[in-house]
Image: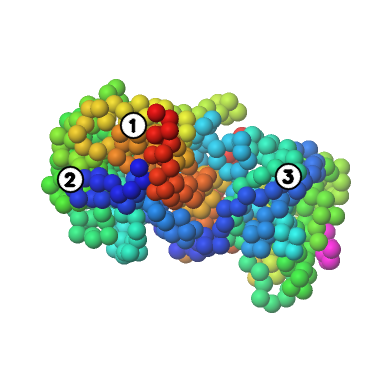
Amino acid sequence: MSATLLPESDLSRARDEVATCIRADGLGPGLHLLTLEAPEAAREALPGEFAQLQVVPGPLLRRPFSFSGVDPGRGTVSFYLRVYGEGTRRLAQLSPGSPVRLLGPLGRGFSLPQVKGSSLLVAGGVGAAPFPHLAGQLLARGERVRWLNGAASADQLFPLGLLPAGLAGSLQVTDDGSSGRQGLLTDALAELLDGVDRVYACGPNPMLQAVAEMASRLRPEALVEVSLEAPMGCGFGTCLGCSIPLLSQGTAVPGLCCRQGPVLAADQVDWEGLRRQPSHLE
Amino acid sequence: MGGEVLVGRGLTLESPVGVASGTFGYGFEAERMGNLAGLGAVFTKGTTVASRPGNAPPRIAEVPGGMLNSIGLQNPGVEVVATEYAPRWRGWAPKVIVNVAGSTIDDYVRVCQRLDPVPEVAGVELNISCPNIAHGLDLGVDPHAAAACTRAVREVTGKAVIVKLTPNVTDITEIGRAVQDGGADAVSAVNTYLGLKWSRVRGTPVLPGSGLAGLSGPAIKPLALAAVARLVAALKIPVIGIGGIASADDAREFLELGARAIQIGTANFYLPGIAASCAAELQQGSGTAHRAERR
């Protein structure tokens, strides 16, 4: 129902299944990796797509999370999440065997390359969420994959051991220098863009905007895709709650994060419009 | 309890279970997800003369037992609905009833006039009660204006005319009687309640502007039941119950109270298959048995 000409997610692949919690591991302050048995989602979920999770009893609306890990063989999926409120708190506290309703896969994911090349994955904080799955798919295609992860401090970096083996390189950056290099992620970005064909980024909006600007300036021939987030009521395009400002053929249009996104080419995002939007995670 | 129902002017729904405007788009998402089966009616997103981009985000906020929305009637405008969407409804089992919104009586007339010759449109639901756009509320809180709007639309369409009532009035039956006198075939009630969520972090309402928004969800069910009970007692025309319905038992409460049909709203967001499953459950007639047992 959106007026944009941008492509929309394929809702026919989404299933509403009752998943079972396998484990919920604490990975840092407020950071958790939730692993669910969800055979249908595990068969279908592509990198960058998301699921709407509902815990009962819990908040009314589901909460959207990118698929972090997907194991079709075991029938499991995992989600890397940060506790912000009631919904995420309940998910982080799930005990093994607890049921969780999972609607997915939803949204449009990352575009996977048709020809081999070099990819840089750029993750800010909990924005690491979609990348284990993406890295696995890229490596399986013979892609050269490098990893750049920034966080406030060492305990908020995504554990390197949870990324698939075979990365061509990784760099960690922390605000306080407690691990890796001290500084901002974008300070380290410039030196990693050389020879890159694809940049995939997820994190806070200001970081994504900076990554998009730097990449288009220093590596204009590279594909740059970003994974955005917005408060979502439904996740499949009917509540119109997750409006995000997009550009279609250069014209500003309201889009839906859940249908045209969450992954968008950086030049499809109206960054200035996005910057004016207040944060919803307060 | 789950069979065919007549909601006015020859408009028969195969099930009393419908889906509320603004919670189901124009039905295409549910079609893709396989969630249309068994529904009596799809009440579309509020449709205006011209397209509207909707309000600036954030547009929704969760509250205990419900949610607030201030979408601002984002829609593609009636021309797109009539020419591009309607052909895609051909062959659907649920009747499609287009929810119509505007700021003036003339807006409602123009949209209904445009939809009158469209065969896939089974009826119109006049949203004289959207709290999210300036002036839209005035028609719904003034019995004379509500009646005049209904009468004006009645003159330009042969389709069933349902008027959706706001609960944000002193006496909802006064507006109900006015639109009944104006020629409405049925009323639907209730639209959202005015609500506000405050952010102590920002020191402002969570939603933009005044922060006033529409409250929906299970939290409003007792309020909606009260409004529907009063309307059923006061009106001769059918009442379609809306408000916090999230299960077949919730639907039965409204139907037992005297509602001719019901609409499921906010629950469609977190349980996308709920309307279809309620329709199936009601069709099986378990509600009647349950009711008999209890007596």
Question: What is the span of residues highlighted in magenta in the rendered image?
Answer: A165-170
Q: Residue B280 appears at what percent x and percent y?
A: 43, 50
Image quarter of residue A60: top right
The disc placed on residue B153 is: 2
Callout 2: 10 Å neighbours few (<14), some, many (20+)? many
Q: Where does label 3 land, which residue? A: A97
Q: Residue B149 appears at what percent x and percent y?
A: 19, 39
Give me the chain letter of mark 1. B
Give the side of residue B150 with respect to residue A35, left or right: left
Q: Is residue A10 visible?
A: yes
Task: In this rendered view, identify the residue nearer to me: A31 or A71.
Answer: A71
- Seen in the picture, residue B129 relative to A240 is either above or below; the reply is above
Could you tell me the amino acid type at mark 2? Val
Q: Main secondary structure of the magenta part?
A: loop
Q: Residue B164 appears at what percent x and percent y?
A: 29, 38
Give the side of residue B174 with respect to residue A168, left or right: left
Could you tell me the amino acid type at mark 1? Leu
Give the side of residue B270 with respect to residue B285, left or right: right
Could you tell me the amino acid type at mark 3? Gly
Give me the chain letter of mark 2. B
- Seen in the picture, residue B154 relative to A41 is either above or below; the reply is above
The disc placed on residue B257 is: 1
Q: Residue furthest top?
A: B170
Callout 3: 10 Å neighbours few (<14), some, many (20+)? few
Q: Residue furthest bottom?
A: A115
Q: CA distance from mark 3 to mark 2?
A: 56 Å
Give me the chain letter of mark 3. A
Q: Are marks 2 and 1 on the same chain?
A: yes
Mark 2, secondary structure of its residue: helix
In reply to whether residue A167 is colored magenta, the answer given is yes
